[in-house]
Image (cartoon, grey):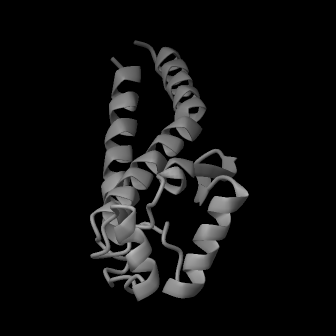
Amino acid sequence: MTIDEAEITFKNAIQKLAESQLADCQLTTLDMIGFIKLRLAEGGGNADGGQFTDYSTVYGKVRQAKGLQVNFKDFNVSGRLYASIRPNVKSATFGRVEIDIVPSGADNELKVAGQFKREGGNILYPSPQEIQDATDAHTKRRLEAAQKLFE
């Protein structure tokens, strides 16, 4: 391969990686969302490792009557909140993508906002370990994609 051919190959590879950047970042955010949902569902507490407050006595009885667990806050009654959590792209430029993890629908937005006040933070914020695990998976996917471009 000549230097000119190598340069063309390299430029094409960079272009293909740039084209897949946004989709790859959205996939990484979906990984983080999965980790967050798992932590919430299993009573893992907040992103800092602290536990959420207990359900109030009255609300705990309401949950028990519906057959729901009351040992820890899982923020799940119908599943609609969990189903609504999605990545929201704030900005995307070459080499940088900003994505928020948000619920969709006014009712779900109100639920998360209400928990922000009660729990002192965003219940959908990923923990450092969740960020690291999703980042590791992202890096692996991007490296594998880059290697394939040069095969």
Quadrant where the C terminus is found in the figure: top left
Residue 47 appears at what percent x and percent y?
39, 74
Q: Is residue 54 visible?
A: yes
**Which residue is at 58% across, 70% downward?**
112
Residue 95 versus residue 35: which sits nearer the camera?
35
Q: Residue at x 50, y 26 (%)?
A: 13
Q: Is residue 73 left or right of residue 100?
A: left
* Quarter the N terminus occupies: top left
> Who's the residue at 60% across and 57% down the image?
103
| In the image, residue 7 above or below residue 124 | above
Q: Quadrant of residue 99?
A: bottom right
Q: Is 42 placed above or below 49 here?
A: above
59 shown above or below 95? below
Q: Which residue appears farthest toward the front when viewing the image?
A: 65
Instruction: List x then y, in percent, for residue 149.
Output: 41, 22
Name the image quarter holding residue 142: top left
Which x, y percent locates residue 124? 49, 66
Q: As drawn, is 71 to the left or to the right of 46?
A: left
Count of marks, rendered view: 0
Report x, y in % for residue 32.
41, 54
In-front residue for pair 9/29: 29
